[in-house]
Amino acid sequence: MLTQKQLDLLEFIQKRLSKNGVPPSFDEMKEALDLRSKSGIHRLITALEERGFIKRLANRARAIEIVKMPNSPEFQNNTKSDIYSSTTTPFSANSSSAPIESVNANEIPVMGRIAAGVPIEAISEISHNVAVPGQILRGGGDHFALEVKGDSMINAGINDGDVVVIKETNKAMNGDIVVALIEDQEATLKKFFVRGEAIALEAANPAYETRTFPHEKIKVQGRLVGLLRTY
């Protein structure tokens, strides 16, 4: 089942590939579909890939291959009712491509950047909002998002440029990935461990050393509950 926007994007990509052999850029897709952000295009691309209509080729820029079209033989058994029209196009990468309405998407503030490397100054100003699937926000409470800068959490699947979703809390358990405020000045994203009378902030990259601080110098500001990624 495709949304109308997914179908529009698939046809746009197919036309561009037929014309010059090169798929359109995300900016061109965004303009063609009249979307406000490239994150919406990413979600459409992810949905098309999960449903087997396209394939993205690794380590190649703008490398998208059309696998099938709705008029291909393997799609002929479907009817027009299989094309689901919706005015809301974003999809959650963690919801099996269900329309974002079905997972009760909510907007949360993006507070700026958080270091996943050498700690940077604490961020407290809202830069913009981002839509997050409701399943990530389950359990209630206040949430905010931060853009990751650095690669110290790469082995935990958190890359430079990712947006992490944080649940506000001042408590953490050993092994939790938290936003930690160091001496009220620096904020960092790290694994949290209590070691005797100290707090250890551990990277998920062997290139970075674990940093240890007295309890009173660390304030937990939130715990990681989700991650958003664009390509």
Image (cartoon, helix red, strand yellow):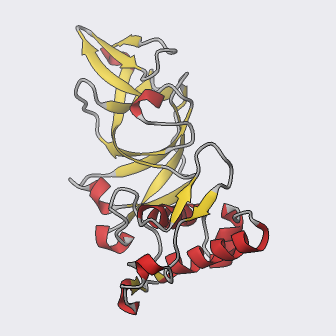
Residue occupying the far front of the picture? 73
Residue 140 figure quarter: bottom left
- Residue 97 appears at what percent x and percent y? 37, 66
For this rendering, which residue is in front, 172 or 215?
Answer: 172
| Quadrant, the N terminus | bottom left
- Residue 169 appears at what percent x and percent y? 29, 39
* Image point (57%, 74%), residue name: 10
* Image point (26%, 52%), residue name: 141
* Image point (30%, 67%), residue name: 103
Residue occupying the far top of the picture? 196
- Residue 18 appears at what percent x and percent y? 72, 73
For this rendering, which residue is in front, 179 or 24?
Answer: 24
Left or right relative to 162: residue 140: left
For this rendering, which residue is in front, 151 or 178?
Answer: 151
Check the image and report above or below for 153 versus 196: below
Left or right relative to 72: residue 1: left
For this rendering, which residue is in front, 160 or 145?
Answer: 160
Is residue 204 visible to the viewer in this orientation of the structure? yes
Is residue 2 visible to the viewer in this orientation of the structure? no
Left or right relative to 13: residue 93: left
Residue 225 figure quarter: top left
* Image point (74%, 65%), residue name: 21
Check the image and report above or below for 95 versus 30: above
Residue occupying the far right of the picture? 20
Q: How many labels does the image show?
A: 0
